[in-house]
Amino acid sequence: MICETPEDFAAALPAFGAIAGLDLGTVTIGVAVSDGMRHVGSPLETIKRKKFGVDAAKLLEIVAKRDLQGLVLGLPRNMDGSEGPRCQATRAFARNLTKLTDLPITYWDERLSTVAAERALLEADTSRKRRADVIDHVAAGYILQGLLDRLAHMKDQA
């Protein structure tokens, strides 16, 4: 089930349980997971993309292994907020994934998530090679944390 808003996503989730954030690139998929209380998102791994069926099987393996309750996909909007081909590809990936899982899926604006991840890795004095290895799942962590913070804010407002 695709949830277009964080509110719809929150309503579709059980009260507790980890969720995953995905940074879908053309070559890799960065994966991050939250704790069961959904306070903190942590980078997990980067999957080398092959074809949809193989990528989806690997993601669903992670979902099963970690008993994940939902997925948030970074939506790579243009800086002016419009959606281009990469957003269309992300939405198509989500639609295809709904045929394989009943998990709620939502989107999070990922503008500048890779920039923020790169900055954090530079501040941590991470080598160029290591940055290349981890940038995608660190970016997924930023995507996931953005949604987790929004969910927490919604709870505070209730």
Image: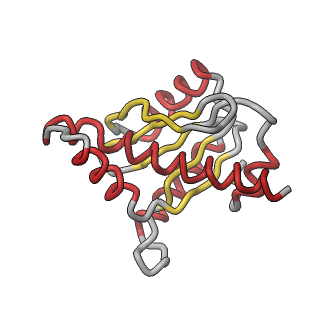
Front in this rendered view, residue 146 or 110: 146
Front in this rendered view, residue 105 or 10: 10
Compared to 38, does 148 lie above or below?
below
Find residue 33 and report its horizontal and vertical position in percent.
Answer: 53, 33
Coloring applied to the structure:
secondary structure
Find residue 62 and report its horizontal and vertical position in percent.
Answer: 53, 25
Compared to 134, does 62 lie above or below?
above
Residue drawn at (45%, 41%), measured in percent from left and top?
52
Looking at the image, which residue sits at the far left? 128
Looking at the image, which residue sits at the far bottom? 80
Compared to 6, does 127 lie above or below?
above
In which quadrant of the rendered view does residue 45 lie?
top left
Front in this rendered view, residue 133 or 42: 42
Image label count: 0
Horizontal side of residue 86 vs 148, given as left or right: left
Horizontal side of residue 18 vs 61, given as left or right: right
Looking at the image, which residue sits at the far right? 158
Find residue 70 and report its horizontal and vertical position in percent.
Answer: 66, 39
Residue drawn at (20%, 38%), measured in percent from left and top?
126
Horizontal side of residue 79 vs 128, given as left or right: right
Find residue 48 and report its horizontal and vertical position in percent.
Answer: 32, 35
Front in this rendered view, residue 7 or 54: 7
Horizontal side of residue 113 vs 70, given as left or right: left
Quarter holding the C terminus is bottom right
Residue drawn at (46%, 43%), measured in percent from left and top?
141
